[in-house]
Amino acid sequence: MRAIIVGGGAAGLYLSTLVPDSIIVERNPLCGKKLRATGGGRCNFTHASPVQELLVHYNGSLPFIRKVLYSHTPEDIIRHMEQLGIRSKTEDDGRVFPCTDNAEDAVRALIPDAGRIIIGREVIRADKNGNLFNVYLDNGSVLQSPALVIASGCSASAPGYRGSGYSILSSFGHTITPRRPALAPLRTERNLREAEGVSISVRVRYGRKTAEGEAVITHDGISGPVILNISRDIADGEEIILSFSDADMKELRVKDPRKLVKNAIDLPERLLRALIGNALMDKKVGNLSKSEERTITEEISSFRTKAWPMKRNAMTEAGGAILSQFNPETMESKLVPRLYAAGDVLDADADTGGYNLTWAFATAWCISQSLMI
Ligand SMILES: Cc1cc2nc3c(=O)[nH]c(=O)nc-3n(C[C@H](O)[C@H](O)[C@H](O)COP(=O)(O)OP(=O)(O)OC[C@H]3O[C@@H](n4cnc5c(N)ncnc54)[C@H](O)[C@@H]3O)c2cc1C
């Protein structure tokens, strides 16, 4: 056996297609559980852009990430998936999916023969004796291999996850930076429940930063691409300021004082009602008092609320095993020869849009280049 891979998720499965004499140990009773949920069940497995454009969507050491992504680009991923029988399509925004729109097909194409997977078993620790790694499973058995790959992912959307991948890397001397939810919806103190389901373009201010894009009002807060992408930077209970509209009430008063507020402001009615309440909705713009005008302006353009990233709904995590302790060409540890790491366990994360799977697959490919020498 050439290598033991800890984790049969996106990175571990992709690697196993490139290294035929490897064995995956997966703690769940089936491999690729998270992969099946990606892209709303459609598996947005990469993003069709040149690497230079992809990079702005990543957080972490960009020179390191750049090297990895240039080694195995989205085009290479699309080609490899095609070789595995997954034809793909690219949507207008650059996101790439299997033509069948079914994540299950992608998982099926990546899963190796049953003889190369040990499922329902957790790797609880590992050590190295001479040139061999000893890999200890939760049923007391011990496997041996000349190479060990940690592809154990992160705790996001992984019930029962105990972080043993991180503790194995720490036990070999690797540094793990503090982890926090990323790509998570926000629960908000002031909620807009009445407008649940409304999709809207927003500008969000948080700390000293501003982001703009599509958001969706949820039962207890707000989600959507722009919110998911900034959630890694929001501390629990931090104030965010949402701007739904730049409508100028004074201008509206001059332009059409007889219009009702609900018809004068270009926002979905349910959202406007949730923001300003019933009483103001049906007033004529020209009849609003100065303080009512101010209230409306504040609510539609500077809606202030405290927010909390929702850990249990996060798609990934920020933080993890620091990149500088790995070689970006091979993903081999600089501390322990023939120890490798791939995917979410590393201190790199990205926006929504296929970038996280791109990272998982590209890091796996780098490892394969070293293992197959
Ligand atoms: C709902 C959802 C939707 C997403 N959609 C997208 C998308 O459309 N596009 C995109 O790019 N990204 C998406 N992501 C993120 C993407 O799924 C992850 O970035 C990717 O799966 C990471 O791959 P990984 O192999 O590092 O980890 P995982 O895929 O999480 O795999 C890790 C595996 O290791 C196993 N494991 C952990 N510890 C051990 C142990 N000690 N012993 C044995 N097994 C162990 C786990 O059970 C798991 O199967 C989404 C995530 C979620 C939750």
Image: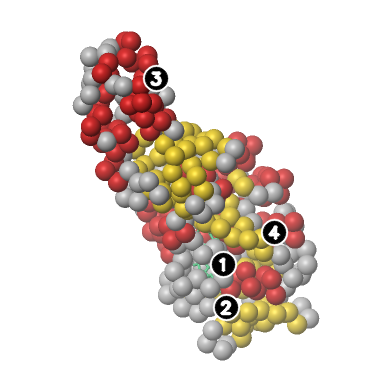
- State the mark number for residue 322: 4
Name the residue tied to disc 2.
123
Is ligand 1 closer than 8 angstroms to the Cβ of mark 1? yes
Q: Percent x, y for residue 96?
A: 46, 43
Q: Along the line of sight, which residue is nearer the eye, 61 or 336?
A: 61
Residue in the image at 40% along x and 46% along y = 223
Q: Percent x, y for residue 59?
A: 62, 47
Name the residue tied to disc 3.
248
Above-or-below relation of 12 to 210: below
Q: Nearer the viewer, mark 1 or mark 3?
A: 3
Q: Amino acid at mark 3?
A: Asp
Quote the CA–CA distance across marks 4 and 1: 15 Å
Mark 4: secondary structure? loop
Is ligand 1 closer than 8 angstroms to the Cβ of mark 2? yes
Above-or-below relation of 163 to 210: below
Q: Earlier in the sequence, mark 2 or mark 4?
A: 2
- Residue 53 seen in the current view: yes
- Give the quarter of the figure containing the N terminus: bottom right
Q: Pick out the residue farthest to the top.
A: 254
Q: Nearer the viewer, mark 4 or mark 1?
A: 4
Q: Along the line of sight, which residue is nearer the eye, 56 or 317?
A: 317
Mark 1: secondary structure? loop
Badge 2 crowding class, 10 Å Cα cut-off, few under 14, some 14 to 19, many 20 or more, is many
Asked whether disc 2 touches disc 1, contact meaning CB atoms under 8 Å apart, the reply is yes
**Which colour style is shown?**
secondary structure
Q: Percent x, y for residue 155?
A: 51, 65
User: In the image, 238: left or right of 371?
Assistant: left
- State the mark number for residue 152: 1
Q: Amino acid at mark 2?
A: Val
- Residue 24 seen in the current view: no
